[in-house]
Amino acid sequence: MAPIFPTWCLRTVVTALAVHLSTECKIWSSAGAVVERGSSFRIFCTFPPMCESSVYLDKHLRQPKRLNSSTVYLDAENITDSVTYSCHCKPGRSSVLCGIDILAGYPPGRPGALTCVKNVFDVQPGFVECRWNSVTETYLPTTWVMSLSENRTGVSVNLTGSSEDSRSFRAGLSVDNSIQMIFVKVYAYNKLGRAESDTNNFTLRDIVKPSPPVLNIVECSSRSCKITWRHSLKTHLQVQYRDVTNLMTAEEECIPYPDSNSPETPGLPSSVHSLEPSRRYCFRARAKLNSGFWSDWSRPVPNRTEEEVPDKKLDVWFARATSLPNMLTVYWKSLKDSEAKGRVLGYMVHVYDNHTKKRTTHNVSANDARFSVQSCVTCLVTVSAYNSKGSSPPATVPTLFKTAQPPQDLHVIESKDNVSLYWSKADPRLQSTGYLVEWYLQDQQFEKLQWIRLSSAESQAVITEIDPYECYDGAVYAFYENSLGKASFTGVNTLVSVPTGAPSVTKHGGDHDVTLSWTQIPRHQRGGCLHNYTIYVGNNKDPERTYHVPASEHQYSIGRLPPATYIVWVTAWTEQGEGPRGETIKFIIQEETNTLPWLLMAIFVIIVLLLCLFKLLARCQRLKMILISLRDVPDPSNSKWVKTFTDNKSKMDLHVYPSDFSSEEEEQIVTFFENPKNDEDFSSVHRPDWGSGTAPQTPYIKSFSHDSDSSHYTHSSQDTGTTAGYITSQAEESVIAEEEGCIDFYPRNVFDEPLVFGGGLTLDAVKIDCRNLWENDL
């Protein structure tokens, strides 16, 4: 242990006090100031009279024994370290102090492991450097001297050794090249003793050591590198190398492995073989003369081997979305450096349709590890990696498999660090060609798909690439010769915590049936696999309602809620517990009002009004048709049918069709009767011409009959294009009165029988143009 009080400080204090108090305080050791470790001795302190004395070992107070009235002593036993003793005296108000440093150590041991080397630098005189060490640690200042001479009795040169550490020393001097042998001896001494080594003789040619070689540019192929060097002497060369591809290029890190020594090569370029393609190596070399020691290692030189064509297939897998069955996402794992044999420049995805013989090629970036293509039943999809030398063998995507029985009894065991899977073979009669285990973050199969392949003899797998507080799904596939079986697993995780986030809820619908939907919690807030959600529905009247929904659902419908003001929130659960309450939403369910009687009454009123309107329109339409028929009354005396009527018969039926105002209007038949005066014979009636302007005063009647079966009409005046009809003056007045009111029309039964009027109606008095009965002239 180092002394607490510095020696120089204590000595200064003691010296200063000794000038004034030399007779008042003295301290000394019975063994002196330097002692061997493990020894025992006494410390004495002398004080002036009437002094209150005390003794300290370092800073710790000790109880001394009194030797006489002015002297006390303290026994020091088994001292193992350098210490400081001090004596204190208080003769009143002033204090007196004196002290001593005790150094503990060992005498020097016999110098050992003496070696000498003659370093050769071109043609200059060699520099002989000798090294040795101390067998024991002295813990005391020790002087080491090396004596060197050309012979045992000659004049020697004494050199003080310099210390590299507490036990290693060295010394050296230049020696002329003519000297063949030297004699060396080492001495050591300190305050506790002295030691010396035996005299050692060295033949200089046996201890010569050349300077390090200077390596030239290293030339490399894909599997070997050629090294040349420059040296002033004819030397042998030894090379070390190291693959530093994944290390920084800093020179201090370019240190070859100690066991990578290449065979010794005398004076010729050295080749290093068995290297890997496209790898960065670090080389260094050392030289040796025909005798002597190897030189120090040269400065490291890096270089890279050339690339080769990759000869290993990619490990490929696939995933297919159920929503897009004709789209295939292909995944692959990057080749290891030893497999790529160069820097991968990209990937080639080939799709070959065996049916159409069409090949499609996609060039994918080297930074990508997946690509989506459009596939078909007859399509073959392959992937290969390429570098500057060529492409790897194509790896076929295994998509055209028949469905086979999946692995049986799949068990999943979760721990805090990994997930273990166990299964058994589905059908022992089928020879499995291997297994594949895939896993991915839940809901992110196409972004985070991972997989491992296993041999057919394995029936378990341990997945270590599982992030804590994350939820994973996956599957185990069993491959057979032409079939594939799949067993899925869901919701596995390692470390789990309570969710730190809550879903955001939204209300849909209205009235008394409410549908609630909520969003997913952000992945970093879930804490692992969610087990379920809890919906809380509360109001100011009833107790709070809760609904538990599986974690796979994100919507829930609540029916027949009573009128009230509601608040709703949703929480999430893991196996560790329930997450926090999220933001609430508020909605109101209103009281129901009985609107059915009012609705029925409104419908009834509308129906009545429509019926009245339809009836009014129908009557007005019929009236208008009659008025149109009376608008243009020609002179019927010259009509052809009048002549026929007066010659042959006294009755004629005229089919009258209404206008297109109503498609339901039935055919009107107008029947005319003539009642001749004085019982005149109808056959003798004169048939006037249309152009005469006169007509016999013959009364007529007009009646309407209905024939629903007739779809055509006939009349006797088609040759002239004019149709005539007749009506009494009394009837015309009635019609005019009807037009003014347009409310009460003749009931249909009024015209069921012919109306007979008196003989006051003649052809000269009434002229009716019946053409408008068939025209849509409205």
Image (cartoon, rainbow, N blue to C red):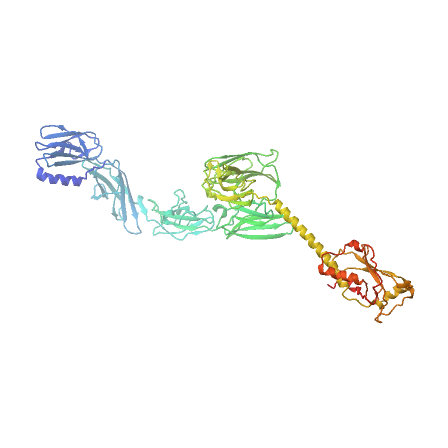
In this rendering, position of residue 136 left or right of residue 676: left
Image location (x, y in percent) of residue 609: 67, 52
Pick the front one: 473 or 572: 572
Pick the front one: 655 or 458: 655
Quarter of the image containing the C terminus? bottom right
Q: Quadrant of residue 753?
A: bottom right
Image location (x, y in percent) of residue 512: 56, 42
In this rendering, position of residue 774 left or right of residue 1: right
Q: Residue at 62%, 52% (x, y): give it.
A: 358
In this rendering, position of residue 213 left or right of residue 190: right
Image location (x, y in percent) of residue 128: 27, 46
Pick the front one: 696 or 666: 696
The answer to whether residue 519 of the structure is visible from this angle is no
Quarter of the image containing the N terminus? top left
Q: Quadrant of residue 774?
A: bottom right
The answer to whether residue 22 of the structure is visible from this angle is yes
Q: Residue at 71%, 56% (x, y): give it.
A: 616
Image location (x, y in percent) of residue 65: 14, 28
Q: Quadrant of residue 631?
A: bottom right
Q: How many marks?
A: 0
Pick the front one: 97 or 205: 97
Q: Residue at 89%, 68% (x, y): give it.
A: 686
